[in-house]
């Protein structure tokens, strides 16, 4: 599709030039001319959020009533920006399978209205200004208000000492938020579903991921798995966690292991949960996660993963 749209010689030459720049990757998008400021705002917030990102040659070429937008971005942030653009309902033009997978995943979140925490950089710009300027950092951290801590960190015009203190306390605030959501669900089981989603928002948070808080992300995801295991009504969440490309591969596999252990010993009792897995489990994502993280699992755990994948594949083949 992208090659159909790029009709001018100049644009074709630019595409060829950009594609050979292996340290950067190319993104094209098509937007109405009225959305130019929105697009520029997203890019601005993106660069403020990820200090090490490189974005070059942002250009707007007129294509009838629209702009064809092109830019080069650090390969590390290629799919992250594509996700955020899609969540902001900006049409990314691509024939790259990796990009198409990210776009489909983001569109699925939009359809299911599962975008809280993934609302894109336009959303981040709207919530970016601190709202608790009169509260000391200690109080904000004690409340587990990690979003406010992120707002303070992002406030480049704010007090430098306050921003630095917020950076130092980000991990503590996130841990308190995780524990708070977990405790609330234990006390009130009606909150299990909602709080699993809140914890998974933390586990998938791009701000934390960009700052290499891997252990924090994995802890959040593990607690979400534990909550899902607390009631069979939420076993289906484990399949969704296994599918989620924005979670660490190790967590994808842990969720599938947990689901298999919980349900396969008695397939009749858990037939509805297994039917859900047959319909929605993403075996391609499971294979990708297995290739990346299998070394972190024991022989028995790897057998469980293979048992799950074999069962799903065979059942689908027989249908």
Image (cartoon, helix red, strand yellow):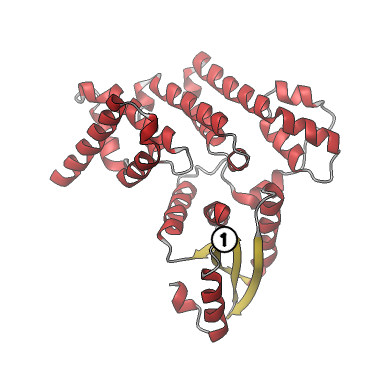
The residue that appears at 55% across and 17% down in the rendered structure is 183
Q: Nearer the viewer, residue 20 or 29?
A: 20
Report the quarter where the N terminus lies: bottom left
Q: Nearer the viewer, residue 51 or 121?
A: 51
The residue that appears at 60% across and 60% down in the rendered structure is 73
- Residue 81 in view of the camera: no
Q: Position of residue 209 (x, y in %)?
A: 58, 40
Q: Residues within 10 Å of mark 1 (few under 14, many from 20)?
A: few
Where 251 sits versus 1, above or below? above
Relative to 207, is 195 on the left or the right? left
Label 1 residue SS = loop
In this view, which residue lies farthest toward the bottom?
9
In this view, which residue lies farthest toward the top?
187
Q: Position of residue 123 (x, y in %)?
A: 65, 48
The residue that appears at 41% across and 25% down in the rendered structure is 228
Relative to 221, is 175 on the left or the right? right
Relative to 86, is 318 on the left or the right? left
Q: How many marks?
A: 1
From the image, tell me which residue sits under label 1.
23
- Residue 108 in view of the camera: yes
Q: Quadrant of residue 3?
A: bottom left
Q: Quadrant of residue 295?
A: top left
Q: Nearer the viewer, residue 318 or 215?
A: 215
Q: Position of residue 14 (x, y in %)?
A: 57, 77
Q: Position of residue 109 (x, y in %)?
A: 47, 46
The residue that appears at 57% across and 29% down in the rendered structure is 216
Where 80 sits versus 184, above or below? below
Q: Nearer the viewer, residue 131 or 239?
A: 239
């Amino acid at each position: 599709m992208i090659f159909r749209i790029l009709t001018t010689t100049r644009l074709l030459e630019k595409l060829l030039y950009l594609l050979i720049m292996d340290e950067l990757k190319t993104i094209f998008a098509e937007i109405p001319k009225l959305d130019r400021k929105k697009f520029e705002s997203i890019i601005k917030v993106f660069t403020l959020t990820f200090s090490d990102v490189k974005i070059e040659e942002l250009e707007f070429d007129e294509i009838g009533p629209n702009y064809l937008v092109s830019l080069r971005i650090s390969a590390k942030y290629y799919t992250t920006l594509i996700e955020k653009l899609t969540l902001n309902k900006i049409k990314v033009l691509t024939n790259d399978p990796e990009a198409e997978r990210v776009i489909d995943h983001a569109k699925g979140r939009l359809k299911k209205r599962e975008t809280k925490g993934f609302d894109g950089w336009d959303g981040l710009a709207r919530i970016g200004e601190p709202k608790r300027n009169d509260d000391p950092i200690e109080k904000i951290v004690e409340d587990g208000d990690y979003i406010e801590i992120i707002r303070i960190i992002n406030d480049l015009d704010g007090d430098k000492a306050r921003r630095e203190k917020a950076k130092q306390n980000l991990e503590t605030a996130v841990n308190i938020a995780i524990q708070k959501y977990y405790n609330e669900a234990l006390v009130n089981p009606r909150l299990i579903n909602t709080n699993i989603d809140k914890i998974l928002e933390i586990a998938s948070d791009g701000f934390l991921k960009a700052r290499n808080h891997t252990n924090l992300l994995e802890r959040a995801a593990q607690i979400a798995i534990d909550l899902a295991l607390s009631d069979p009504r939420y076993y289906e969440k484990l399949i969704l966690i296994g599918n989620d490309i924005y979670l660490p591969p190790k967590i994808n596999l842990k969720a599938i292991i947990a689901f298999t252990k919980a349900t396969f010993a008695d397939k009749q009792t858990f037939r509805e949960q297994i039917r859900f897995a047959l319909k929605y489990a993403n075996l391609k994502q499971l294979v990708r996660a297995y290739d990346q993280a299998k070394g972190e699992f024991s022989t028995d755990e790897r057998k469980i993963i293979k048992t799950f994948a074999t069962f799903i594949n065979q059942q689908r083949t027989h249908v």
